[in-house]
Image (cartoon, grey):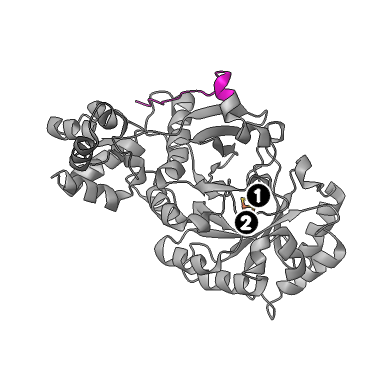
């Protein structure tokens, strides 16, 4: 957290003097890193009362401001302190693509040649933002383009929440200029790049900011964490930030899931389903969503659907309410996998419904911009060629001013 005042201090000073100055000047805090408790602590460190932290929090998250001078109800002395002790900054935007059906995909630069994606999916009754939690992913699912990128690093809390901060205020400005209180994003899914529960300590403060009425005020039912099954963190999430939970299942047995979701070798299906059952004690919904990406000839055959039904029988693994979300695969060439045919998807879905299970088929959205949420497939080029894009002047140095 925070950015050290390194450059100007080290220029032209002897080493010992640099060290002295460096110790005196505390790091400048990125305020998007702070949930409200941390903001209160920060404000107290500046000699301010807790309510000042709440005011600041509201200016940043509810109004999208980053210029302290415009935060008109903060005392001048506080604004001055903030101008030297803190900053609010989203990640540089590399590109913005809007699909024919209104889906928007943003690509953000997170440094050292890495980029992450954020996808906005508008529907008639809601607007969902799909957020990334890591640059790359260590889980390495075989059907996921992020898995093919390898793992670079965890995103900070600021980098996670700034995706919502940026999207919410950019869209507000576009959709209803001047209507600063008109909320645009109603749902958040942590289904972008990365395994959120492998970045737990940065995820939880970001979730708290999303849920905070002084920030985005999202409902716990409309905020979903999707996991490939990091068992020890599932219960902790329930205790610390109990939002809706989705499990990336994708296979009805361990042998196949070991191949598709390698984390299964550490936490096999029975353990993961048991952890999800425990999560229902805290969850805002009385069911767990099971994501199942349909891959032609791999996990979409009769034998698979029957095994899935068997697994979800009350006497078997998931002896609690589940909703199965079937996801048509979004192909990308490195995977060598194909999307199941529409007829096959329908057969699979009908068989589940006939067995009395709750099942939906996710609509494919934003296909013309490779924006399928949950996989963010394709466009690997986009993530690996930032330096060449920079050289071509294609990185957009955005510093959004939403005031
Ligand atoms: S599906 Fe999720 S957990 Fe699996 S590799 Fe992709 S980002 Fe990681």
The C terminus lies in quadrant = top left
Along the line of sight, which residue is nearer the eye, 218 or 259?
A: 259
Determine whether, in the image, residue 354 is placed left or right of residue 197.
Answer: right
Task: Identify the residue under disc 2.
Answer: 139
Picture quadrant of residue 181: top left
Secondary structure mainly formed by the magenta segment: loop
Question: Disc 1 to disc 2, how far (Cα)?
Answer: 6 Å
Magenta residues, start to end: 389-403
Task: Identify the residue under disc 1.
Answer: 147
Q: Is mark 1 within 8 Å of ligand 1?
A: yes
The N terminus lies in quadrant = top left
Query: Where does the image place residue 95, in percent across and percent down from the top left?
Result: 57, 27
Query: Where does the image place residue 7, in percent across and percent down from the top left?
Result: 31, 30
Q: Secondary structure at mark 2?
A: loop
Q: Residue at x 30, y 38 (%)?
A: 4
Determine whether, in the image, residue 71 is placed left or right of residue 304.
Answer: left
């Amino acid at each position: 957290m925070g950015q050290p005042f390194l450059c100007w201090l080290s220029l032209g000073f002897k080493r010992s003097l640099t060290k002295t100055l460096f110790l005196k000047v505390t790091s400048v805090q990125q305020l998007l890193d702070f949930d409200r408790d941390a903001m209160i602590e920060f404000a107290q460190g500046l000699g301010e009362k807790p309510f000042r932290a709440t005011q600041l929090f509201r200016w940043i998250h509810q109004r999208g401001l980053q210029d302290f001078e415009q935060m008109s109800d903060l005392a001048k002395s506080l604004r001055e302190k903030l101008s030297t002790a803190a900053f609010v900054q989203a990640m540089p935007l590399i590109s913005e693509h809007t699909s024919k059906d209104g889906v928007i995909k943003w690509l953000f630069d997170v440094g050292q040649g890495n980029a992450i994606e954020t996808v906005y999916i508008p529907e008639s009754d809601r607007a969902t933002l799909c957020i990334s939690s890591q640059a790359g992913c260590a889980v390495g699912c075989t059907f996921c383009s992020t898995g093919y990128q390898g793992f670079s690093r965890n995103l900070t809390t600021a980098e996670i929440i700034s995706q919502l901060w940026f999207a919410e205020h950019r869209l507000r400005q576009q959709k209803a200029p001047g209507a600063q209180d008109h909320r645009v994003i109603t749902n958040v899914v942590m289904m972008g790049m990365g395994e959120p529960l492998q970045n737990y300590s940065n995820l939880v403060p970001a979730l708290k900011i999303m849920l905070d009425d002084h920030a985005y005020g999202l409902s716990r039912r409309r905020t979903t964490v999707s996991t490939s099954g990091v068992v020890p963190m599932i219960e902790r999430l329930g205790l610390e930030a109990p939002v809706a939970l989705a499990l990336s299942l994708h296979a009805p047995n361990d042998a196949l899931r070991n191949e598709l979701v390698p984390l299964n070798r550490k936490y096999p299906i029975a353990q993961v389903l048991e952890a999800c059952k425990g999560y229902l004690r805290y969850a805002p919904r009385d069911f767990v969503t099971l994501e199942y990406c349909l891959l032609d000839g791999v996990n979409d055959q009769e034998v698979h659907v029957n095994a899935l039904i068997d697994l979800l029988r009350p006497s078997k693994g998931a002896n609690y309410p589940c909703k199965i979300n079937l996801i048509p695969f979004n192909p990308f060439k490195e995977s060598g996998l194909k999307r199941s045919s529409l007829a096959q998807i329908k057969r699979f879905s009908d068989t589940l419904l006939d067995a009395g299970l709750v099942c939906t088929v996710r609509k494919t959205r934003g296909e013309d911009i490779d924006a399928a949420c949950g996989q963010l497939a394709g466009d690997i080029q986009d993530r690996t060629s930032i330096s060449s894009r920079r050289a071509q002047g294609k990185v957009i140095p955005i510093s959004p001013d939403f005031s």
